Image: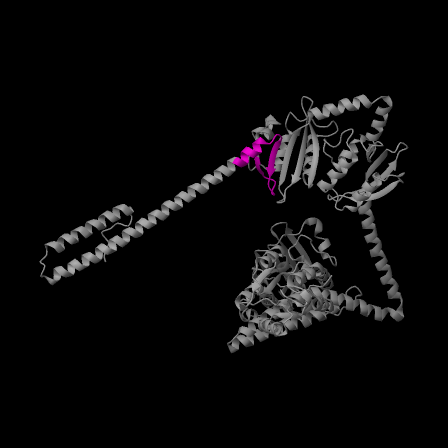
């Protein structure tokens, strides 16, 4: 039916009106036509059909209009509810008696109440959502209402204020003009934001002055001056365990609120506050101090050490006075402890070097002990450097399983062979690197085609980069250089492995630039970058950047081997990095005289774009032998390694024997001897860490589902669908040789 006379841009009512007119006209034509005419009858039938379609279209349009009206009503209600909630939130904040402000995890002001702006009127007009905390502090430092301490400049005040802001919890006082005082309290929120309260404490300060003035005579003033000029934080309690004196250093070290640091405050209030605020990172020290204070008999002198969550070491000394009162002093010994740790490390290094020189002088035992040391270094390095080619080999083998074309199979076999050849080459290179310090390393300087080295490494790492969703690009080259092929490949492999490992998102680029008579091999990434202060440390053995993504996968030997190999070969090594943007390593190698190879020889076959399944280790806990065998057969058909156990005892024994932890656990709920799979999962996690787990059960009760939710365990109801099980395994990031510890 041709409806071109109806304009689709008209409203629904207008379209209905036109269609009804069309139907009415057709009906009139039918009525005017001859009743005996076959053509009139046909027109009549078409008119009836048209009317039915018009009615159906009208009903559809009416239903659509009704749904649209309902959706608009719900949207209006939701917007009204959101506006009401926002209004209630601001009303609640405005009702707070203190000045309140909230900064998010990026230290940007989210909201504040009017009392927060009243404290410093000349800063109020600068307050508003989006204000950075650093700018807020700078604005405050220029306020004419703040009175800085006599020995502190405005810049010093800003520096100290920003330093205290980095703590988890802090309380401090600010003096204002007109002899007014303000207590500022900051507390980190669970989302790493900052909640700030400003409380007027002028009256408390004045009351404290009056009470202290009443107690102070000439001798008391002398004692007070002495206490305030020593470097220890001191608090004095009477026989009733009530505070009678303290010095300014105590406030600096412990930052107690002004409400607690008052004459007459019981020691129990101090203990409760520090326990609630979690100032110290352990409870044994504060508990021991409390037991000493509550001792009913004569207290012996107490010496102990406390460690705060801000990484400050405090030497604590307690002494009882003749009237059963007591004095507690706190000394900051952080510098001494850090120096002691550094000295211990230096002594350990010195002892190790002395031992190595002693062993070298023992000719009868030198060869055997050197072989053992080389073997140990080789094993440690292999655990780091064999990760990439072995992982690549597993991925290629997985693609071989699914390959159907003969050429694809041959191509995959060649890639697997190439990966294992890489392992053999690495083993030989590591054995040579272990001799670098002794000067016995054997070099074979030849012409090395860089294109072949880069193409082979790109093929090995491409699948690994794909798993991390990184864009790995290898630029072909025809340059030939003079170097040792094994060591040069080892250098580039380590640099490329680090780039892929430490880059979370973005790109990794491997290429070569010609610079005069030298070729500069460059590896660039978009990773986190390396701070300038840590660039020298990363080339030492077992040094890793703690903030790097995936740093736990390596042992910190890769760049140490790169530096030594470059020094041995005379290749210049250069590092360029910017924190937050990425890192580039550049190795400069001498070009061979006039030699190049065709670019077509460097490319080889394109890498497969097929996505390979992960190589997982799955622990299966099932007391039914037939079910256990069936589940194991299914998993192994997917290329998954399985560890079988009939219960918790068998699983513990198996994990202890193998010395590895699985990537995921599949446990039946009903086990032998009244045990269940959730208890087994909990027990294994207590020794192996939080391992992903799924409970396979026919029990569909709410109790089992709730326990799984609380423990973070996936619930798979029997019979298990293979597709769901495979999807679960695909969601687990494969672990690489996780040692039990």
Q: Is residue 96 magenta?
A: yes
Q: Is residue 595 visible?
A: no
Front residue of this view, candidates 149 and 693? 693
Q: Residue at x 34, y 47 (%)?
A: 66
Q: Residue at x 52, y 36 (%)?
A: 88
Q: Is residue 224 magenta?
A: no
Provide residue 490's location: percent of width, then percent of height: 68, 66
Q: Residue at x 59, y 73 (%)?
A: 630
Quadrant containing the N terminus in the rendered view = bottom left
Which quadrant holds residue 523? bottom right
Q: Which residues are magenta?
A: 88-111
Which quadrant holds residue 169? top right
254 lies above or below 365 = above
Count all numbered tags in the image, as a single digit: 0
Left or right side of 27 for 619: right
Provide residue 123's location: percent of width, then percent of height: 60, 29
Front residue of this view, candidates 644 and 648? 648
Left or right side of 145 for 310: right
Left or right side of 373 for 419: left
Which quadrant holds residue 471? bottom right
42 lies above or below 641 = above
Provide residue 95's location: percent of width, then percent of height: 58, 31
Quadrant containing the C terminus in the rendered view = bottom right
Q: Is residue 491 visible?
A: yes
Left or right side of 710 for 85: left
Q: Residue at x 25, y 56 (%)?
A: 53
Front residue of this view, candidates 400 and 360? 400
Q: Which residue is at the far bottom?
A: 406
Colour pattern of the rendering:
one colour
Provide residue 185's location: percent of width, then percent of height: 67, 35
């Amino acid at each position: 039916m041709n409806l071109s006379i109806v304009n689709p841009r008209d409203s629904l009512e207008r379209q209905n009106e036109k269609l009804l007119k069309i139907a009415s006209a057709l009906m009139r034509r039918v009525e005017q036509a001859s009743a005996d005419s076959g053509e009139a009858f046909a027109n009549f039938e078409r008119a009836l059909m048209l009317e039915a379609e018009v009615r159906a279209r009208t009903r559809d349009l009416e239903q659509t209009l009704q749904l649209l009206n309902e959706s608009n009503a719900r949207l209006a209600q939701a917007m009204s509810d959101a506006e009401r909630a926002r209004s209630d939130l601001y009303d609640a904040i405005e009702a707070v008696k203190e000045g309140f402000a909230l900064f998010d995890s990026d230290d940007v002001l989210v909201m504040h109440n009017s009392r927060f702006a009243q404290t410093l009127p000349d800063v109020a007009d600068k307050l508003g959502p989006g204000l950075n905390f650093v700018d807020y502090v700078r604005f405050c430092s220029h306020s004419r209402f703040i009175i800085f301490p006599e020995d502190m400049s405005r810049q010093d005040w800003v520096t100290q204020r920003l330093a205290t802001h980095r703590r988890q919890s802090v309380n401090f006082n600010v003096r204002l003009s007109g002899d007014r005082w303000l207590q500022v309290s900051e507390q980190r929120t669970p989302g790493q934001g900052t909640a700030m309260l400003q409380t007027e404490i002028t009256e408390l300060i004045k009351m404290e002055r009056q009470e202290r003035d009443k107690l102070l005579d000439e001798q008391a003033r002398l004692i007070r001056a002495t206490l305030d000029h020593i470097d220890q934080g001191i608090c004095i309690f009477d026989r009733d365990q009530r505070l009678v004196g303290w010095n300014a250093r105590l406030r600096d070290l412990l930052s107690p609120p002004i409400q607690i640091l008052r004459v007459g405050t019981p020691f129990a209030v101090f203990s409760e506050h520090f326990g609630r605020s979690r100032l110290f990172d352990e409870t044994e020290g504060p508990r021991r101090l409390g037991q000493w204070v509550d001792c009913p008999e004569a207290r012996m002198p107490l010496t102990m050490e406390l460690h705060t969550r801000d990484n400050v070491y405090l030497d604590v000394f307690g002494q009882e006075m003749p009237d059963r009162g007591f004095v507690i002093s706190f000394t900051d010994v952080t510098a001494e402890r850090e120096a002691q740790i550094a000295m211990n490390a230096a002594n350990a290094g010195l002892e190790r070097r002395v031992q190595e020189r002693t062993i070298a002088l023992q000719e009868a035992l030198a060869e055997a002990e050197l072989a053992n040391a080389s073997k140990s270094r080789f094993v440690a390095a292999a655990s780091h450097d064999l990760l990439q080619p072995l992982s690549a080999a597993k991925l290629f083998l997985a693609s071989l399983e699914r390959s159907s074309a003969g050429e694809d199979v041959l191509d995959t076999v060649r890639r697997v062979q190439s990966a294992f050849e890489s392992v053999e080459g690495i083993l030989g290179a590591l054995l040579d690197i272990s001799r670098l310090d002794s000067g016995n390393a054997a070099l074979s300087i030849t012409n090395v085609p860089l294109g072949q080295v880069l193409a082979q490494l790109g093929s090995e790492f491409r699948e690994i980069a794909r798993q991390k969703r990184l864009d790995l690009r290898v630029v072909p080259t025809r340059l030939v250089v003079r170097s040792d092929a094994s060591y040069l490949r080892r250098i580039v492999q380590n640099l490329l492995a680090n780039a892929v490992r430490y880059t979370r998102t973005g790109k990794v680029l491997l290429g070569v630039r010609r610079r005069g008579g030298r070729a500069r091999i460059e590896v660039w990434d978009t990773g986190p970058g390396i701070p300038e202060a840590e660039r020298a440390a990363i080339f030492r053995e077992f040094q890793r950047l703690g903030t790097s993504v995936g740093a736990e996968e390596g042992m910190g030997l890769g760049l140490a081997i790169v530096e030594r190999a470059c020094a041995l070969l005379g290749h210049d090594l250069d590092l360029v990095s910017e924190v937050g943007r990425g890192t580039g390593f550049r190795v400069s190698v001498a070009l061979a005289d006039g030699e190049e190879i065709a670019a077509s020889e460097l490319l080889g076959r394109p890498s497969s774009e097929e996505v390979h399944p992960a190589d997982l280790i799955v622990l299966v806990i099932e007391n039914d032998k037939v079910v256990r065998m069936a589940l194991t057969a299914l998993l192994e058909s997917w290329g998954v390694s399985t560890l079988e156990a009939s219960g918790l005892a068998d699983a513990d024994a198996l994990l202890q024997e193998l010395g590895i932890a699985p990537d995921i656990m599949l446990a039946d709920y009903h086990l032998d001897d009244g045990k269940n799979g959730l208890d087994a999962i909990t027990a294994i996690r207590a020794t192996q860490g939080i391992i992903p787990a799924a409970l396979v059960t026919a029990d569909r009760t709410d109790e089992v589902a709730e326990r799984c939710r609380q423990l973070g365990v996936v619930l798979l109801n029997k019979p298990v669908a293979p597709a769901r099980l495979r999807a679960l395994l695909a969601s687990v990031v494969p672990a690489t040789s996780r040692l039990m510890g």
